[in-house]
Amino acid sequence: MRYLTKVQVIERLKKSQGARTQSEFADELNIGQSYLSEVMSGRRDPGDAILNHLGLQKAVLYKAVK
């Protein structure tokens, strides 16, 4: 099992967008363009529609600090 950072997920998403506009890509994913823009800029976490498109699942990890 391989884990990706948020930056790596965003990079994959941008690559997946290809030459389409954000609006066209958002329509394909059935999400709002403003939400897609916020995810691509790192201001919001990707939801199920985006993760499914990329063939990913969300995993929550906890790190011990002491």
Image (cartoon, rainbow, N blue to C red):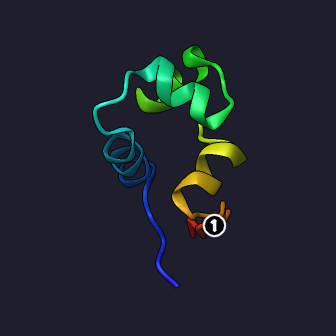
What residue is shown at x 28% (from left), y 32% (from top)?
Answer: 19
Q: Is residue 52 left or right of residue 16?
A: right
What residue is shown at x 66% (from left), y 60% (from top)?
Answer: 58
Residue found farthest to the top? 34
Q: Is residue 49 left or right of residue 11?
A: right
Q: Nearer the viewer, residue 16 or 46?
A: 16
Coordinates of residue 1 in the picture (x, y in percent): 52, 85
Residue for badge 1? 61
Coordinates of residue 51 in the picture (x, y in percent): 61, 53
Q: Residues within 10 Å of mark 1 (few under 14, many from 20)?
A: few
* The image quarter in which residue 63 lies: bottom right
**From what the image shows, is residue 37 above or below residue 49?**
above
**From what the image shows, is residue 22 above or below residue 9?**
above
Whether residue 43 is visible, yes or no, is no
Q: Nearer the viewer, residue 58 or 15?
A: 15
* The image quarter in which residue 62 lies: bottom right
Q: Nearer the viewer, residue 16 or 51?
A: 16
What residue is shown at x 58% (from left), y 52% (from top)?
Answer: 53
* The image quarter in which residue 31 lies: top right
**From what the image shows, is residue 40 above or below residue 48?**
above
What residue is shown at x 31% (from left), y 39% (from top)?
Answer: 18
Q: Is residue 59 left or right of residue 34?
A: right
